[in-house]
Image (cartoon, rainbow, N blue to C red):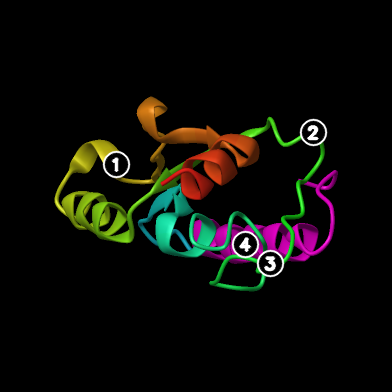
Amino acid sequence: MGHALEPGRVTFHDKMVVRKAIQDAKIPFTYVCGAGFAGYLAGSLLHMGTLVPPKEKVLIYGDGNAKVSIVDEDDIAAYTIKTIDDLRTLNKTLYLRPPENELSQKQLVVKLILR
């Protein structure tokens, strides 16, 4: 993740330090990732650092067509709980990316404006 832009680069670096420490200590793990929290990302129209949508204008990142998988926090929690007793997830990473939940920032803005 060395190619990531700030502030994401710091977050990715910190996560990798923690993951390496867990693996070096031989602590059993299951990482659950790959999904954006709906309450955080959708409500703010993908604006980082806020939970509310912008009032005046929307900042579109890049061309606005990059897709992100947005999943409800309750669903993320439910799948996380299911990994506890599932040996198939031991020392693995579970990615939550339901295809029907993949939206670009432009699609998200249009959906929320037109509702």
Secondary element type, mark 3: helix
Instruction: Please give the residue where the numbered disc 2 appears in the rendered image.
Output: 63
Q: Earlier in the sequence, mark 2 or mark 1?
A: 2
Q: Name the residue: 52% across, 34% down.
A: 103
Asked if the stretch drawn in magenta spans residue 12, the answer is yes
Could you give the CA–CA distance between mark 4 and mark 3, rounded to whole angstroms?
4 Å
State left or right for residue 7 relative to residue 41: right
Could you give the CA–CA distance between mark 2 and mark 4, rounded to whole angstroms?
28 Å
Instruction: Please give the residue where the numbered disc 4 appears in the rendered image.
Output: 15
Q: Earlier in the sequence, mark 4 or mark 1?
A: 4
Asked if disc 4 and disc 3 are in contact, CB closer than 8 Å, the reply is: yes
Amino acid type assigned to the residue bearing label 3 in the image: Asp
For the residue carrying disc 2, how many other residues have a C-alpha within 10 Å: few (<14), some (14-19), or many (20+)? few
Q: Is residue 80 above or below residue 1?
A: below
Chain part drawn in magenta: 1-24
Residue 48 falls in which quadrant of the image? bottom right
Q: Name the residue: 42% across, 55% down.
A: 38
Residue lying at the far top in this picture: please name it: 99
Could you give the CA–CA distance between mark 1 and mark 3, rounded to whole angstroms?
23 Å
